[in-house]
Every structure is written in C-alpha cells, then in structure tokens.
C-alpha cells in the first residue's frame, strides 16, 4: 500500500521500533468506496449468523482490535 502511494509510514518520535501508518490524500480518496465494500462484505458474512452470534462475533473482533492495550487476563 505504501508503494502504491495509499499510505505513508512515519516513525514514532521517541521509539525507533514503532512506525505509524497514515492514509495519504490518494488513500483517503478511496476510503468511501472501500467503506461501502467492507459494509457489504460484513453484512454478507454476519447475515449467515443468528443476531446473537453476529453480535458476539463483532464484540470479539472489537476486543481483538484493542488487545494490545488491555492488561493480561
């Protein structure tokens, strides 16, 4: 994505091990179309589950997205 000019990496100001990734102007221009595609895919996938299971699955995915900020269980 960086080679395609859609994102750029910027180093963390104090930790050389970390690089932050940001959308470029070109990447931001594609975001509305990609959001629609992602919403359609999510509706298709989640539509295969019961409402309760779909909600549980979404909750697990959200939690996984924040796992690095949580204390160990």
Image: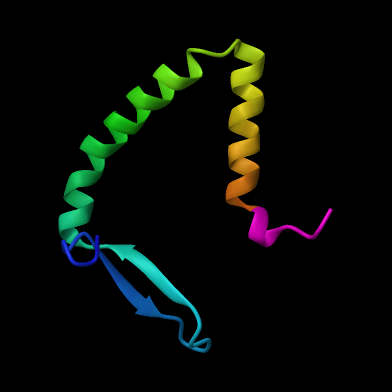
Q: Does 22 sit above or below residue 65?
A: below
What is the count of numbered marks?
0
Residue 24 at x, y percent in the picture? 22, 62
In magenta stretch: residue 50? no
Residue plotted at (59% across, 39% down): 61
Q: Does 32 sit above or below residue 5?
A: above
Tell me which segment is drawn in magenta.
67-73
> Splitting the image into 4 quarters, where does residue 52 fall?
top right
Is 39 or 2 nearer to us in this picture? 2
Q: Does 33 sit above or below residue 31?
A: above
> Splitting the image into 4 quarters, where does residue 30 fall?
top left
Relative to 36, 70 lies left or right: right
In magenta stretch: residue 71? yes
Relative to 24, 50 lies left or right: right
Q: Does 71 sit above or below residue 33?
A: below
Residue plotted at (59% across, 20% down): 54
Relative to 71, 41 lies left or right: left
Relative to 14, 66 lies left or right: right
Residue plotted at (62% across, 23% down): 55
**Residue at the farthest right position:** 73
Residue plotted at (52% across, 89% down): 14
Residue 23 at x, y percent in the picture? 28, 60
> Splitting the image into 4 quarters, where does residue 4 fall?
bottom left
């Amino acid at each position: 994505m960086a080679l395609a000019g859609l994102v750029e990496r910027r180093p963390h100001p104090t930790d050389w091990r970390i690089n932050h990734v940001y959308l470029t102007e070109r990447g931001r221009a594609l975001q509305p179309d990609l959001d629609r595609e992602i919403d359609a895919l999510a509706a298709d996938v989640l539509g295969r589950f019961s409402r309760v299971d779909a909600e549980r699955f979404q909750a697990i995915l959200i939690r996984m997205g924040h796992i690095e900020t949580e204390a160990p269980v």
